[in-house]
Amino acid sequence: MQDPFYNKAKRKKKTRMLAADAWLDSALYDFWQALGRGYTNIEDFFSKFRVSGLKRFFVEIFSDALTFGAIGMVLVTALALPAFDATATGQFNKAEDISVVFLDRYGNEAGRRGIRTDDSYPLNKLPDYFVKAALATEDRRFYEHWGIDVVGTLRALASNAQGDSSLQGGSSITQQLAKNLFLSSERTLERKINEAFLAVWLEWHYTKDEILKLYFDRAYMGGGNFGAAAAAEFYFGKKITDVNLAEAAMLAGLFKAPTKYAPHVDLAAARGRANLVLSNLVDAGFLTEGQVTAARRSPALPVDRSDEVNSPNYFLDYAFEETKKLVADSRSASFVVRTTIDPVLQTYAEDAITSVVREQGEQYKVSQAAMVVTEPTGAIRAMVGGVDYGKSQFNRAIVSNRQPGSSFKPFVYATTFEKHPEYTPATVVSGATRCIGDWCPRNYTGGTYGRMSLISAFARSINTVPVNLSIDTGRGPIAELTHAMGITNDFPVTRSLALGAASVSVLDMASSYSVFANHGYKTPAFGITRITTLTGDQIYEANPDTPQERVLSERTVQYLNQMMRSVVEGGTGRRAQIEGVPAAGKTGTTSSYRDAWFCGLTGNYVAAVWFGNDDYRPTNNLTGGTLPTIAWQKFMAYAHTNIEIKPLDGVDFEPAPFVIADAEDGSADDLAERPPTLQPEAARKLLDVADALRAALDAVPAATDQAAFVTPDPAPPVEAM
């Protein structure tokens, strides 16, 4: 037991921790006190600058302006980084650097594409009134500003607000040059900021005269011309140094809108624009009204370019892009390209499209259409990419952005026949609705059907039957066969694929339907047969003997042609019937009536027709069996005049006999007839005759009356494709 009276001696506790704690507290206290005294001193210092009343208002405004200005500078600098990258490379935008002369299938010139440029004239050799006309219209303060004309921009904004936007532009010449040299033509805020930075960069690195010279040489002037010198030669057939005041005013009016004001496109608009340029010369003080009066009274008369305006422009745009791919490895810059286009068929294809749209487009609320015509071998004979090339150069014939609707169904039925050899057009299947998940197809009439034959379902464009077939065959094989036949665009394989839920082009549809006209062999559409340089060196030549790939059996081709013939005889495509011609095809209409199609074929030609609106606006209940079929029939009726009608596989039809109407037969006077197609041997004989006549003329003595001789133009040679 412990002694209760025992006390153990207590040890002394260490005081180090207590001392450290006291030091820390004291240090923190001293720090905060010092910080407080410092803040008080700062307040006392700035109190000397304190303002109140009206002065305080201006100080606050100035302070906020500096703040937001700093933020804006950071933002603008960030957006301008691409501009810095563009100047760092030291490279300008590459202009079109090849020139192409296109020939039609007969060897006659069809049009030109590519660059026409001439930068050989120094600035001081250009007519003074041309330079002043450009400055007066595009940038009156060019020699005063530093790349960005703030005053001119404000003036242009005020002018636009008054509805006078055609007189002046907002961008300076330096800004326009910056866009031409470094940027694209897209209208975005980022591009405008980059344009401003690049304009300042140009002003730092080039003199005013050098900038103006670059502008005159690099600006696009319409008609495939780059630069004022090339434009003067193209539009007026003379050197830039020889143009008069009226011609100079017309040229100066092209810088802003070359396509709109090009005199070979719209002479009235070009002269109106030139008159405004003359007014600008007077307003800017460069010339007096008396000096421009003669130019107003005698406006410029450009060289006749009507042949180029009437050329197959949509096709030439397509062929030009194809040419650039084929000559990519060539060192030459100028080429002659032989194409497959038939000028006569092209004219009637354009007439068929434009006449139908103009006559009935307003009724159906449809504004655009496209057509592609090929031979069964794939040679493109006509291409119409829109109603008016002058107003819109967008080629609707080659862009894969439209759904084909029921015109896609031949691919579904072809897959079925390939997968099920026991099936025939007379095979009876169920027309009942079968849903795929939560999606159920609907027929155009909204009703349901029982059992029916495949040919009946196809002719009446029943939707439930192809969907049922796609369930049996699988949608993957349908997509594979579609691509094998000629659809080049990739599309998702969805539940509604059997009803045409895929994006296709008019060109691809024509190419795919050519398989049915070419006995089941794949026939990719092509528009170029030969490419040579100006010196005659061959770059490319299509091989007509290239082995073809069979993608459909003969049995499937015959079955589908029978079914498409039933569409024309008694189905949705009855308007496509042509007397004496075995026509076949399929109509197509998409949801909300946004797209209407007719794709059809004969033994001679294949044509795909599309109608719709560029903004995807629904039409007024337009179906494939109306305007597209009417336009198709109108073209085909002419195309099959005075030619031998070829049979169509699987179609029991006896074509009309090939008879060329006698000119003395009065009953044939009112018929539109195309000249019979020349055979290669006949063309060569005509060329030999022409050569003999030339030789005879050359042998005639100079004293001989040459008026007695007439040299016929050589007949165009004919190619087989």
Image (tube, helix red, strand yellow):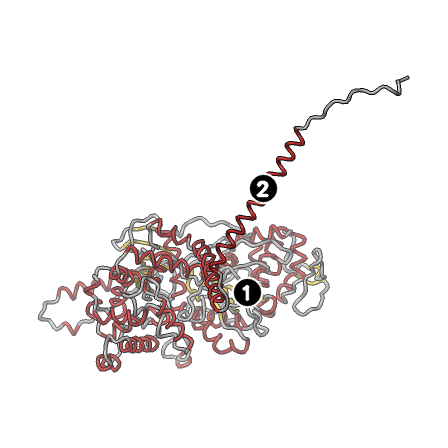
Where residue 72 appears, as percent x and y from the top left, is: 46, 58
Instruction: Tell me the crowding category of disc 2: few under 14, some 14 to 19, or many 20 or more residues within 10 angstroms, Cα based.
Output: few
Residue sitting at the far right:
1
Point out which mark residue 585 bears: 1
Pick the quarter of the image with the N terminus: top right
Judging depth in this view, the residue of 504 and 587 nearest the camera is 504
Judging depth in this view, the residue of 236 and 112 nearest the camera is 236
Point out which mark residue 16 bears: none
Q: Is residue 541 in sight in this rendering?
A: no
Drawn side of residue 287 relative to residue 343, left or right: left
Where residue 672 appears, as percent x and y from the top left, is: 41, 75
Drawn side of residue 357 relative to residue 85, left or right: right
Residue at 60% in and 50% down? 477
Where residue 310 appears, as percent x and y from the top left, is: 36, 70
Residue sitting at the far front:
5
Drawn side of residue 130 relative to residue 675, left or right: left
**Tag 1 and tag 2, C-beta contact below 8 Å:** no
Point out which mark residue 30 bears: 2
Q: Secondary structure at mark 1?
A: strand
- Amino acid found under the numbered disc labelled 2: Asp
Q: How many numbered discs?
A: 2
Whole-angstrom CA distance, mark 1 to mark 2, is 97 Å
Q: In the displayed structure, would residue 393 be above or below residue 661?
A: above
Q: Earlier in the sequence, mark 1 or mark 2?
A: 2
Residue at 88% in and 18% down? 3
Residue sitting at the far left:
703
Where residue 188 appears, as percent x and y from the top left, is: 45, 62
Judging depth in this view, the residue of 63 and 596 nearest the camera is 63
Q: Is residue 170 in sight in this rendering?
A: yes
- Depth-wise, is mark 1 or mark 2 nearer the camera? 2
Drawn side of residue 362 relative to residue 333, left or right: right
